[in-house]
Image (cartoon, coloured by chain):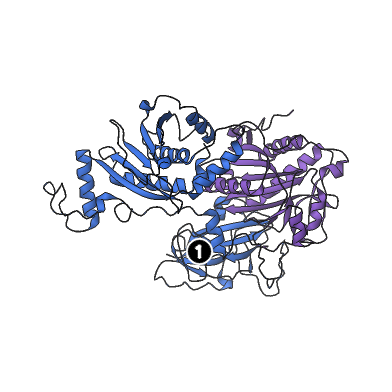
Chain colours: A purple, B blue
Amino acid sequence: MRTTGEGYVEGESGRSVAVYELGTTSYGEVHRLQQRLQSQRREGSGGDTLLLTEHRPVFTLGRSHPTPDLRVGEDLVRQYGIEIVQTERGGDITYHGPGQLVVYGIIDLKRWGMGVLDYLTGLEDTVIGVLADWGLRGERSALGRGVWVGEGKIASAGLNVRRWVTMHGIALNIDPDMSHFEFINPCGMPDIEMTSMAAEAGKQVSFAEVAEAFIFHFARIFECAATPVPIPGGDRTGDQSR
Amino acid sequence: MAVSISVPNLGPEMAGGIVAEWYRPDGATVDHGELICRLECEFVAVEIEAEVPGLLHHRRPAGSIERPGVVIGLVLAPGEALPEEPAPAELPQASTTDHDEPESAAITGSLEDDPEEEPAAPPPLAPGEPVVLPFRRRPADEAPHPWSAVPGDATEFETSLFETAEPLPDAGTAIPGLPLWEPDDDPPYADAFPPAAGSPEARFSAIAAEAADEGQVLTMEVRVSASEAARAVHVLAREWREFTPAPIVEDLVLRAFARALAEAGFEASPAGLTLVTPGSDHAVAIEDAEARGFRDAVQARAAGGDESAERAAWTLVSFRECGIRAATPAVAGGHTMAAAMGAIDEASAMSITMSYDSSRLGQGEAARLLARVRTLVEEPYGLLSS
């Protein structure tokens, strides 16, 4: 087992991030948490934070695309118990659900001395590093932001930035219910094919191990100290055993 | 002084950004820090705030695609004439050497402060010039969807998401229940001070100076919306039910006072809390109520406190369960202040009353402290972090 952040002490780059693994959550509660953390960070309090979670099924919409780009009727989406939520991030519609690692970074990029697109690229590189641990070759694509394995998109990204403090982040499909992607045109692209680590690796992939690998590669890519912080109460609310 | 609003440079990969939305119309009056527009580039939405208060002037419409550094708008001082927009041929090219440094990619810049460098912008895209638009846009004539999560225009949306409660006005002007500003035909200090001629500010200063000398116990009261605090404790109670006693609104109010006191440099710990119920009083003292984990503080309160209530540096008394609307708390000897909270009414509001020793706490400080408490309680999620 690797120790996250090992070798990247805060003094070297001046960057550090507190990592919270939230377990299974509803989108709304983590959305509010992000807003609060971003607000605090903008005001100079709080710290740089990484939130790792998997959401209950939800379609999220980018700020410029308030109309959900659905392939099926809205009623069917409701019948499946999938929420539809407007967000303030860039990009178009995407799906979050169990079996997908979602990582939100609340990072003051001014303090990190980093451009916004460099940060976004770093998130993609982090996912590419994680995929390599499972023998998968992740790549960027001219089709758009995110990470691709072959012809399939495996990770989607989107950010909101205010006063150089980020929120939102990147979502990596580990082993979600891929049929839910069939309801939408992911990222607004009708011909896009989504894939997952389990599908590409042809075997079960542990959510907890992927989360751990993500933290490790995040610390490596951004040269920052990543410190896992236990959630008050000590117990994750969701099933992390996959 | 006109302050420009430029397309921020998000990094070397940035070809351009789209002015996705103006949150405020052309000619609107904007405040410092107010969200005025959003730019988008490659799955990134960048929110632009007004750096100064003034009148907003759009130079580029929503939907236009601009290169980094292009001035898309201005914030003008009241009465200030609109500067003439430089012709494209006169504009210098944007720097390409510092694009990945956030410091160099300042969103706004003063025109007057640095006239030589303004506007550090390339010319707008010429007609017919190819533009790389890195993401797909849905047709603009598509009707807004009823699923838009927050009804109303963009300003309402952002306001609902981000803005905190308005701070209280300056002390002595409009704080409900502030007794010092009630008309008093025969003030007890009439002999010591000449009649308060002139402005209310002069009267305020005179009263404050006298109070500080005399060490009076003064009182002020504020109405606070408790809806968010009630919602927060409800949600937390549900999430914690298997592990932690349920939080109550008093936990948040206590933490708000502790934090406000600590921020103002006053002794905040141990914090005393007395819950007055129809059956009895429960008094506890909590150490580090402003800094420890909220859940930990709730557990400590439910377990009877960290130590004897007599050792508290200050006290919050809650009469909520008894239905008392407001009460004046007694300041214990040696304490700076004491606070009382009343019942939550039908409008989800409650009164918080603070008594304080004027020799330790100035009137302005007290007002700011109470204003800060109100803001924290009305926007309680910031209290949940340690």
Q: Quadrant where the N terminus of chain B lies?
A: bottom left
What is the x, y in percent for residue B256? Answer: 44, 41
Image quadrant assignment for residue B258 = top left
Q: Is A9 above or below relative to B124?
A: above
- Please say if B331 is above or below B193: above
**Image-quadrant location for residue B41:** bottom right
Q: 10 Å neighbourhood of mark 1: few (<14), some, or many (≥20)? A: many
| Residue B120 is at least partly visible in this image | no
Q: Residue furthest right?
A: A202
Residue A157 lies left or right of residue A167; in this view the side is: right
Residue lying at the far bottom of the rendered structure: B127
Q: Amino acid at mark 1?
A: Ser
Nearest the viewer among B12 and B293 is B293
Which residue in the rendered view is the most extreme toward the top? B307
Q: Is residue B351 visible?
A: yes
Toward which corner of the image does residue B60 lie, by quadrant?
bottom right
Depth check, front residue: A110 or B173: B173
Q: What is the x, y in percent for residue A81?
A: 73, 52
Label 1: chain letter: B
Q: Position of residue B114 (x, y in %)?
A: 46, 60
- Residue drawn at 30 percent across, 56 percent down: B173
Question: In the drawing, does residue B178 fall left or right of residue B184?
Answer: right
Picture layout, residue B349 above or below residue B76: above
Q: Which residue is mark 1?
A: B4
Q: Which residue is situated farthest in the left direction here?
A: B191
Circle 1: element type: strand
Horizontally, residue A182 falls left or right of residue A108, namely right
Tell me: A147 left or right of B174: right
| Residue B310, position as x, y percentages in the image | 36, 26
Q: Nearer the viewer, residue B118 or A182?
A: A182
Q: How many marks?
A: 1
